[in-house]
Image (tube, rainbow, N blue to C red):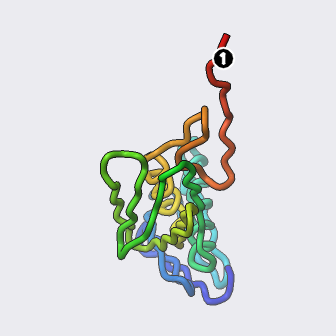
């Protein structure tokens, strides 16, 4: 465990506090969470297929919670296309995506969104929340394979298709 990070367990709920906030998550009752000094251990109560699957998943969730309260998770989306714009105003993101109307998306609590030029940066301490919000925004205008217009992740590559051939 890093310094300035506290983990507390009550019933099946794990709460992690750190410099960037606190996160709560309920762990399945098949998994037992023990906090001993500077270490957190997860142990299945019974050896079953379900408990072994939940064991690794719970450990990954706990690791992400500890990382998130110390350094924020970040996703970047790139908006490509003529006339496609994005701007943050208050707790909403305003998109011009080639539709006849602007698209307003409300920013969820616990997330910080910055839109510069055509790069949208989403950051927050909850990895699951950051990823799902980025996917929700990307779904508004997915990249198309012919010209590459649309919204894509910064590390995503779009396979381009060849257009119609003239005879």
Q: Residue furthest bottom?
A: 4
Q: Give the image location of residue 79, x and y in percent.
A: 55, 54
In this picture, residue 161 sits left or right of residue 22? right
Find residue 84 and report its horizontal and vertical position in percent.
Answer: 48, 53
Q: Residue at x 67, y 25 (%)?
A: 162
Tell me if residue 24 comes above or below residue 36 in the rendering: above
Question: Residue lying furthest top in this view?
Answer: 167
Q: Residue at x 40, y 65 (%)?
A: 93
Q: Nearer the viewer, residue 93 or 68?
A: 93
Q: Splitting the image into 4 quarters, where does residue 10 fall?
A: bottom left
Q: Which residue appears farthest toward the left when viewing the image?
A: 101
User: Disc 1 designates what residue?
Assistant: 165
Q: Residue at x 68, y 53 (%)?
A: 155
State the SS at label 1: loop
Q: Quadrant of the C terminus?
A: top right
Say which residue appears at 47% left-offset and 58% top-offset: 85
- Judge by depth and name the residue closer to the eye, 59 or 99: 99
Instruction: Please tell me in which quadrant of the rendered image residue 65 appears.
Output: bottom right
- Residue nearer the viewer, 86 or 74: 86
The quarter of the image holding the N terminus is bottom right
Residue 118 image offset from top left, x and y in percent: 56, 61
Bin the neighbour count of mark 1 within 10 Å (Cα to Cα): few under 14, some 14-19, many 20 and up: few
Above or below, comparing residue 111 to residue 151 in the picture: below
């Amino acid at each position: 465990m890093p310094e300035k990070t506290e983990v507390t367990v009550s019933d099946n709920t794990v709460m992690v506090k750190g410099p960037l906030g606190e996160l709560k998550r309920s762990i399945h009752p098949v998994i037992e969470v023990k906090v001993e000094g500077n270490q957190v251990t997860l142990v299945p109560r019974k050896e079953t297929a379900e408990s072994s699957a939940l064991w690794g998943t719970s450990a990954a969730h706990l690791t992400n919670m500890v990382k998130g309260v110390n350094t924020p998770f970040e996703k970047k989306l790139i908006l490509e296309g003529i006339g496609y714009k994005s701007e943050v105003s208050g707790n909403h993101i305003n998109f011009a995506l080639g539709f006849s109307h602007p698209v307003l998306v409300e920013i969820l609590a616990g997330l910080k969104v910055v839109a510069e030029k055509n790069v949208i940066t989403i950051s927050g301490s909850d990895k699951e929340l950051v990823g799902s919000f980025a996917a929700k925004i990307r779904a508004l205008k997915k990249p198309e394979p012919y010209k590459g217009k649309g919204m894509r992740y910064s590390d995503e590559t779009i396979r381009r298709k060849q257009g119609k051939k003239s005879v």
